[in-house]
Image (spheres, helix red, strand yellow):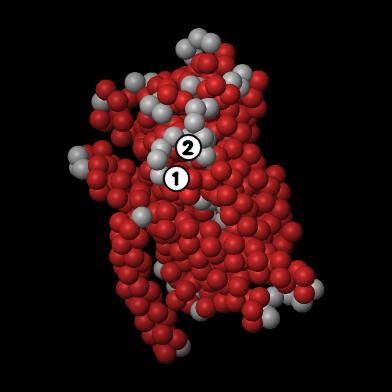
Amino acid sequence: MTTQDEQSKHARQFGLPIATALVMGNIIGGGIFLLPASVAPFGTISLVAFLVLTLGAIALALVFGRLAEKLPKTGGPYVYAREAFGDFAGFLAAWAYWITTWVSNAALAVAAVGYLDVLVPVHESKGATIAAALAIQWIPAFANFAGTRYVGAVQLVATVLKFLPLLLVAVGGLFFFDPANLGPFRADDSGALGAVSASAAILLFSYLGVESAAVSAGEVRDPRRNVGRATIFGTLAAALIYLLGTLSVFGTVPHEKLVDSTAPFTDAVNAMFGGSWGGTAVAVAALVSMVGALNGWTLLSAQTPYAAARDGLFPKAFAEKRRGVPTFGVLVTVVLASLLTVYNYTAGSGGVFEMLVLVTTFTATVPYLLATAAQIYFLVSGQSARVRRGQLVRDGALAAAAFGFSMWLVAGSGYAAVYQGVLFLFVGVLVYACMKARRERVRAAG
């Protein structure tokens, strides 16, 4: 068998089901298992915030779908920003997204260890805890090294395995629903608008990942058609799980207990079916959910640097692919995330790690803002495909709504995150200057 045959055997483009699983799996990580308790102090008005955020996320998903029709290339927001505004804007989108992915991967692994500890008591040894966190990161990385065929298979299986138990709680909980458990509509004194804004600030980042299919457009079969559909289907499925799951937990766990709960889905499962096995069931579901999310995010962490490297904006090693996967980008990302994870457990300074995670809530929005601004630019400048006036107005309204949603994400990340995030972006400016100087030197020599 030739090397090319071997590559094609392990590299396979994603069809619509796997592309949809990539979006859904990356949106739903581990946060959903704590969300109901996080927003319970604001009352059931938090469901209104969830609904508003869902509409914003769907608008953003629709915009990514339209952009992918115009530019069906790997890189997503990087490609759109560079096409509209040039190399520097494209680099900022790629740099910010890359930071988001590897820091988030470290955070996911640390959170996953907490659920693993329910099944296997790894917390008794710091060495065992670190080893478990690293294993949780490297197992999805090895799936990526094996090729897109295996990435897609793991993503599809993980998404199905985590979707089913979450759907069980989301739908099954409605049969055990007791309105008396809901508590007050507004549980604090901040007023309706204040309560919606406060709960939205907690929920805002639940939809990060809507861009997943667009970032991997080059690996999606018939991307002009399937990227947009996968983005919408994946976002809607995640929204369904979020809304129904939160509502079911609200209706099965008494409000006064939910406010202080550290495992709301466990409490809901125990209330629905009795016994005390809910903790084990939820821990397994959470682990599957996070490993699936890590599998998808590890691929995305290499896709944007890959696209930028092909244009000379990242080191050229990032542009190398094996079996459909930018393996060097995957390796660098998992090494950086592993180092950050080890630092978190050995430095004894949790504040630094939490700060870095907080920064990602800002850096994740930079590509969104640039991508939605690019869509507005394409529409206003007439660079989009010729469409009827009504469709142009519709696309413009969606782009404006998505841009507003992205700005809301920035505002929700808080002053500290924006401040620290801007510093991270300025470090990227220095990297861009070096890469641009190198390109000019090579061009002059040639």
- Residue furthest to the left: 348
The residue that appears at 52% across and 54% down in the rendered structure is: 300
Vertical relation: 389 (above or below) 267: below
Vertical relation: 25 (above or below) 73: above
Q: Is residue 389 left or right of residue 164?
A: right
Judging by the rendered image, the residue that carries numbered circle 2 is 186
Q: Are marks 2 and 1 in contact (CB under 8 Å)?
A: yes
Tell me, yes or no, if residue 358 can be seen here: yes
Q: Position of residue 275 (x, y in %)?
A: 50, 9
The residue that appears at 61% across and 66% down in the rendered structure is: 399
Q: Is residue 328 left or right of residue 210?
A: left
What amino acid is labelled 1 in the image?
Gly
Q: Find residue 104 and name its label.
A: none
Question: Mark 2 falls on what kind of element?
Answer: loop
Q: Nearer the viewer, residue 412 or 372?
A: 412
Q: Position of residue 167 (x, y in %)?
A: 63, 30
The residue that appears at 49% across and 31% down in the rendered structure is: 184
What amino acid is labelled 2 in the image?
Arg
Residue 260 is drawn in which quadrant? top left
Q: Nearer the viewer, residue 289 or 337?
A: 289
Q: Position of residue 404 (x, y in %)?
A: 53, 62
Q: Position of residue 107 (x, y in %)?
A: 38, 43
Q: CA distance from mark 2 to mark 1?
A: 8 Å
Q: Is residue 209 left or right of residue 393?
A: left
Q: Earlier in the sequence, mark 2 or mark 1?
A: 2
Tell me, yes or no, if residue 74 can be seen here: no
Judging by the rendered image, the residue that carries numbered circle 1 is 191
Question: Mark 1 falls on what kind of element?
Answer: helix
Vertical relation: 82 (above or below) 351: below
